[in-house]
Image (cartoon, rainbow, N blue to C red):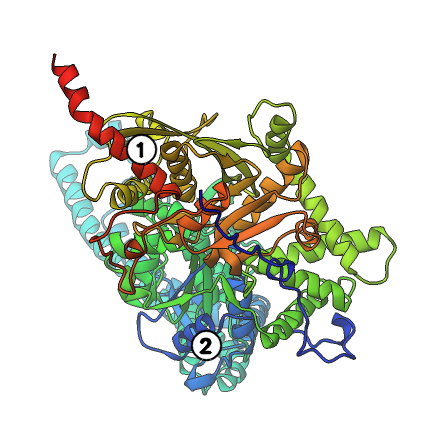
Amino acid sequence: MLKTPMITPLSSDQLYRESTLTNLAQECKSTKHLTPLDEIVGQERAQQAVEFAMSMKDKGYNIYAIGRNGLGKRTMVMRYLNRHEANGNGHMLYDWCYVNDFDEARTPKVLKVPAGMGSEFKKDVEKLIVRLVKALPLAFDNEIYYSRAEKLKGLLADKQESALIGLTDEAKESSISLTITPQGSYELIAMNGEEPHTEESFEQLSRKEQNKLESSITDLESKLRVIVRKFTVWEEEYTDKQQKQDEVVAQDVLSHLTNKLKEKYSNFAVMKNYLCDMHKDILDNLDLFLESNEEQLALSYASLDKKMPRRYQVNVIIHQETGKMPIVVEETPNYHSIFGYIENATFKGTIFSDFSLIRPGSLHKANGGVLMIDAAKVLEQPYVWDGLKRALRSRKLSLSSLEREVTLSGTISLDPEAVPLDVKIILFGDYQTYQLLQHYDPEFGELFRVTADFEDEMPRTDKSEAQYAQFISSIVHDNKMLHCDRNAIKRIIEFSSRQADDKNKLSLHSADIANLLRESNYCARSANANMIRVSHVEQALHNHELRVCRLKDNVMQSFVNGTTLISTQDNVVGQVNALSVISTSNHQFGAPNRITATTAFGEGKVFDIERKVDLGGSLHSKGVMILSAYLASILGKTAKIPLTTHITFEQSYGGVDGDSATMAELCAIMSAFSELPIRQDVAITGSMNQFGEAQPIGGVNEKIEGFFDVCKIKGRTSTQGVIIPKSNVQNLMLRSDIVEAVKKGQFNIWAIEHVTQAIEILTGFSAGLCPNMNPNINGGMNIAQVEHPSDSIFGIAQSRLNLLRLDRPSQMDECQH
């Protein structure tokens, strides 16, 4: 057998990249001396998208911010918006008020007034009405008014009396009396001298006298009806004159009190017009102020705050701080919280609603600014998404009750005037939600034209490390934590690289960094330290690991007590230690798995037992098919492989997926073909293509650490190690104990480019792949020569297979007989 020269294991320097903070001045000893960042590091693409959308005033340029939770999406947007000029590009802010429509109370009017003036206008109107409530009754409670009113009333009474006297005299001439009943009606009675006729006395009269009296009464009744009609006309005239007199009195009071207010708001047409309309309505409804009947007026005055007629209140639904763009974050986006609603009030058993009970929603509050909402929460709530699209399409905010939207009820309700809408919506969500909206809602792309795509990671350079240190400083300052010393900053940056699974990148998952800082701060304060040091960061990481590693401990315990069979020594045919990652919701760790391969005379197929029992996923099955294709291209170019192979993950009772065990499975199969044993002190992970080239896999750090921990359980030797694809070297950010073990030569990590290198490490002998069968520069193979060196692994396997091929005809004959 040909001994193969061993591949040199990786050095300890290649297993972990320490932070140097080269671009940070040496005198900068802690975050105390670092200027906090005013923006989120590494999100330039997303920031440019937000800036572009905020600058576009056209319809539909709303933003969908894509990214996992914890990337700092909201923080970045908030920091940018807080610096954004509210009045830039001619953008103006306004207060919004609802007032009564004096012509149609069901349709309250909306007033658009300059920012900051809504509350002032409301107070001025309230002061005016309160003064009128006091001043108007006083204007009508004086001798001059009373004398004028009595004079009008006397004139009416004189005219009525004069008409009645004439009719009374005419009736007397006919022996008829005109009287008024207790009910106030007029009655004509035939008289017998000074006394009214009784039935007996009337019967004693002659027929001629009776007819004469009846005829006279009929004529008088006709004349009485004419007079009564005149009374009605005279009373209406009196009422009109009295009303005009009252209006003159009220006009004097109103003019005195409102002229200054009209002059104050003379430059604001909307407010001035409302004051004029209110002036006219007060003259038409003076009884509201004169309190002639408190029971009737009680409902008009029913209010939650002040005693004044409700119809003259000003309902300021939005008051903007002058010059400050509204930024609203809606945490619970239901229909009412987004679009507003109309309250009902109860007064003395009566339920009522009016414009003063209109309450604003988030869209009202964000009008002229920005509304930020979580996309998933919006889609969870009924009718909210449709309402949001309707408002963005029409650029109007109609305040209709949800009950009217979803029922056929004919209940009378308010229909307030729509508020013009000028708002930017920023939806925060993940990529899956974005895809669903794009696919199923054709309006989504028209209304949310800007995508702010947040990065998960950024390149790790000396410059970016310095920026990251400033980012750490900003978290420390914002949360008033203890400051981090230089070594603690370095360790947090290294932790970020581990989170990114790449020594040349930094994770932008700011929530993880913030949580680590909070926990490190807790450890430092618990130790009565005045600064967060690297030991506190390590303690925080250890505490977090301890909280979430229950499943890992259970798995490792199965190796301790021998429940899970694994060997980290010896050499075994057709058996290899592969590596896998086990994940929970907040933790993942690696562990070795035993893969075995057995062969039997057959048709050259590779049977994946996991797939046969529906425990293998599609990616794992694809890996098995790839290695089958590779085997056929190496050992079955001219004739079918006469062996059937069965491979399985031993003691696997759950699902298996992924292609990271493809190289391990191939090594187990080649061991079974050649009957050469495989080292059990070495584990392997890695995918491969049809040409045998090693491909990168995920979770490489966890896999190496998992095998290292099992080696400690089973007994450490200096020959133990792990084989990984060379393309995964950039992902290595291993634990310090593994780096130290490699440095001392007590553990090995080999990085390979081709599966044949793995076979040689695991067996200690040359794979013997024919040189003409190595992939050429274009990825193809030369199949002219398929003979492998006879004393190599492929050569031995080929010899065995050729013998089986020679025996195959005789075996087939025996089967036929």
From the top left corner, tell me how far across and down residue 216 is, in percent: 17, 47
Q: CA distance from mark 1 to mark 2?
A: 93 Å
Looking at the picture, does residue 244 appear above or below residue 430?
below
Under mark 1, the amino acid is: Arg
Secondary structure found at label 2: strand
> Quadrant where the N terminus lies?
top left
Q: Amino acid at mark 2?
A: Val
Name the mark on residue 800.
1
Locate residue 406, reporting x and y percent.
30, 43
Q: Secondary structure at mark 1?
A: helix
Q: Residue at x 38, y 40 (%)?
A: 666
Quadrant for the C terminus in the image: top left
Q: Residue furthest top?
A: 817
Between 476 and 241, the one lying in front of the other is 476
For mark 2, does the 10 Å Cα neighbourhood hold few (<14), some (14 to 19), or many (20 or more) residues? some
Q: Residues within 10 Å of mark 1 (few under 14, many from 20)?
A: some
Mark 1 or 2, which is nearer the eye?
1
Q: Does 596 appear above or below 307?
A: above
Answer whether residue 271 is visible to the viewer in this image: yes
Which residue occupies 60% across, 60% down?
496
Q: Quadrant of residue 351?
A: top left
Expressed as whole percent of the image width and height from the top left, the position of residue 275 reads 44, 76
Residue 647 appears left or right of 540: left
Vertical position of residue 27 compared to residue 381: above or below: below
Q: Nearer the viewer, residue 235 or 443?
A: 443
Residue 628 image point, x, y percent = 29, 40
- In the image, 260: left or right of 770? right
Q: Which residue is mark 2?
A: 113
Is 34 on the left-hand or right-hand side of 242?
Answer: right
**Towards the viewer: 337 or 718:** 718
Residue located at (26% from left, 54% from top): 439
Residue, far right: 528
